[in-house]
Each structure stands twice: as structure tokens, then as C-alpha cells.
Amino acid sequence: MRLIIFILAMLQTCVAYGASFDCAKAKSKLEKMICSDPALDKADTQMGESYKNAIKKFPIPGFIQATQKIFLNGFNDCEDVTSCKDMLNSRITVLDDYANAKIYARSKNKYTPEDVVITISGSGNNIILRYFGSWMPDAYKPKPFPDGFICNDEAKLVSKNGQLVADNSDFTTLKITEDKIIMDVMCNPRTSINGEFVRIKL
């Protein structure tokens, strides 16, 4: 009897909060966690909406899809409501920024994770440069993307002598103009980003 009451309560909770998937089919620990917590469910639903908006607005939709695969790969391992909610809220911020960012790449044609996309978003004292791509498989355990090594990081930009510069020393080279970015950064022992990336006009 207690089990029946618990199952009915779970179904009512999921219907009321409207998760981005069918709670009646929730199997994993993460899915059950989302269905049982209204705040987590709300963040999950909002993340889905932000993803759809970014796909619609971003001129290189394959890039949004690739970054989402990386996010979901990590999100599936979150352990508790607080950490899962923090991850979702952080992803929402990034997706919303992508939808309104300045975009730099070598091409806006079909995207693969081996390519690189750089974005600049925000204003005033909160300008963020994000860079993603240059994927390489793990030579010892070669598996398809998203496994392997990739540049996936961000840096805060500050204005110095009328130029935007990174507020850290990770970059060997970073020159930013309205029309292009010249960049050289080592992301990990296997991958790096270097060269010139042209502004993609919307």
C-alpha cells in the first residue's frame, strides 16, 4: 500500500512540474531526482527552452549541439539536487549568452568538434570570451566525441588602453577587434587553439 501511494505521489509531482521528459518513464537516478524536485525540474525545463532559442538564433547550430553533448556528458554524473541545479543554471547562462554573442570562426558552414568557435558576450565589467573546439580523440582509448580532449573554456575580458584583453595569463596571443580574433592558447596536453578567426555577421 505504501508503495502504491509513493508511486501515485511521484506521478502527481511529475505532472504538476512538467519535466522536459516523461516522468512516468524516469529510470535513472538523475531523471528521478529531476521529477521529484520542483526547483530542479524548473531549471531543467528552462535549460531546454534556452537550448531551443540558442539553436534558432546561433548561425552555426552544430556548434550548439556539440557544446550541449559536452554539457550532458558531465550533467549525467551530478550527484545531488544542489550540484545539478548549479550545473543547469550555469548552462542556461551560457546558452542565453550564445544566443546574443559576437561570434568568431573560420567558417559558418557545417560544424564538427574539430572546428573552433569563439564567442564574446556581456558588457561593462562582465565581458566573457568563450572558446570551444579543436577536439582530439584519446589515442589510448579512441572513442567518438564527446570522449577525448577538447578546448572548452572561458576567460573574463577587461578593457586596457582601449583594447579588450584577458584577465589571466593563459593566452600566448590574444588580439581582439570587431572583425577578427587572433588567438594562441594551450588547453590541455593534447589540444590547443591558434590562428585567426573571423567575425560571423548575423
Image (tube, rainbow, N blue to C red):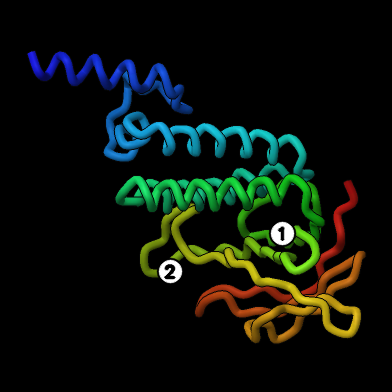
Q: Position of residue 11 (x, y in %)?
A: 30, 17
Q: Residues within 10 Å of mark 1 (few under 14, many from 20)?
A: many
Nearer to me, 24 or 187: 24
Tell me the distance, in whole angstroms, between the alpha carbons under discs 1 and 2.
Answer: 24 Å
Q: Residue at x 71, y 59 (%)?
A: 117
For the N terminus, the image quarter is top left
Crowding at dot 2, Cα within 10 Å, few <14 / some 14-19 / many 20+, comes out as few
Does residue 85 appear left or right of residue 46 in this picture?
Answer: left
* Residue at which label 1 appears: 117
Give the secondary structure at mark 2. Answer: loop
Query: Residue at label 2?
Result: 139
Q: Nearer the viewer, residue 184 or 128?
A: 128
In this rendering, the answer to whether 64 lies above or below 13 is below
The kind of residue tagged 2 is Ala
| Residue 19 lies in quadrant | top left
Q: Position of residue 39 (x, y in %)?
A: 43, 37
Q: Is residue 166 left or right of residue 93?
A: right
Front residue of 170/6: it is 6
What residue lies at 58% left-to-right and 64% top-to-bottom?
152
- Amino acid type at mark 1: Val
